Image (cartoon, rainbow, N blue to C red):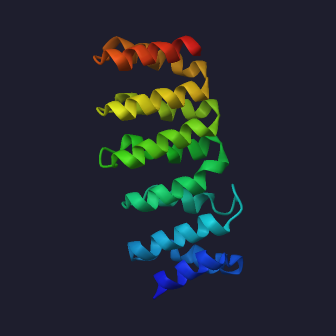
Amino acid sequence: MKEAALVAVQAKKLAAAQDKVRFLVAHRKVEVRREAMRALVLLSKPADPQLFDIYGKAMQDEDAELKMIALDGLAPYADARAAQYIGLPLIDDRSPKELKLKAIQTLGGLGIPEAVEHTVRGLFDDDREIKLATLAALEKLKSDKASRPLQEFILREQDAEVKARANTVLEAL
């Protein structure tokens, strides 16, 4: 019932329901939490300071889909605290590949040097696609803070194509 109501709130973009929706992001049922988070992201102003802690807490939830939605809410903040929460999936081995890729893309889009320390964690993943996405994000961030981690990565990387891409990114910094 609550899920259907939240879907209706999203469809009608009922901003007046935002205060009630806030409380449902902590609901015991994951389906309700997901729909509440979707509604909150849709109804709220980007980078609303009152919602930051809600998005941050969602990044610590067990549900990967909820985290994916919370990433959309955190992306407009573009500060060091947001980068820290956005980077959490990169240090959790249980995070699915899709969540890691979205976190890396979001970190790259922040455009702040503080995002580098969280983004470079993707270089230590076993997945080739995650490594390449990390290199693209680092290239987009254009911070010399990535130089040393990239040099270390290049020394130990076995995949020649990934290594060549890392060298290209390092030269561009």
Along the line of sight, which residue is nearer the eye, 154 or 8? Answer: 8
Q: In which quarter of the image is the N terminus?
A: bottom left
Report which quarter residue 10 is drawn in.
Answer: bottom right
Q: In this view, does 45 lie to the left or right of 6?
A: right
Along the line of sight, which residue is nearer the eye, 55 or 34? Answer: 34
Q: Residue at x 49, y 84 (%)?
A: 4
Residue 42's x, y, as percent?
62, 66
The relative height of residue 158 versus residue 132 in the rendered view (above or below) is: above
The relative height of residue 164 versus residue 87 in the rendered view (above or below) is: above
Residue 87's x, y, as percent?
48, 42
Along the line of sight, which residue is nearer the eye, 4 or 143? Answer: 4
The relative height of residue 25 versus residue 65 in the rendered view (above or below) is: below
Q: Which residue is drawn at 39% across and 29% down?
A: 131
Q: Quadrant of the C terminus?
A: top right
Q: Is residue 49 left or right of residue 99?
A: right
Along the line of sight, which residue is nearer the eye, 161 or 142? Answer: 161
Q: In this view, does 91 lie to the left or right of 111?
A: left
Residue 144's x, y, as percent?
59, 18
Residue 95's x, y, as percent?
34, 49
Image label count: 0
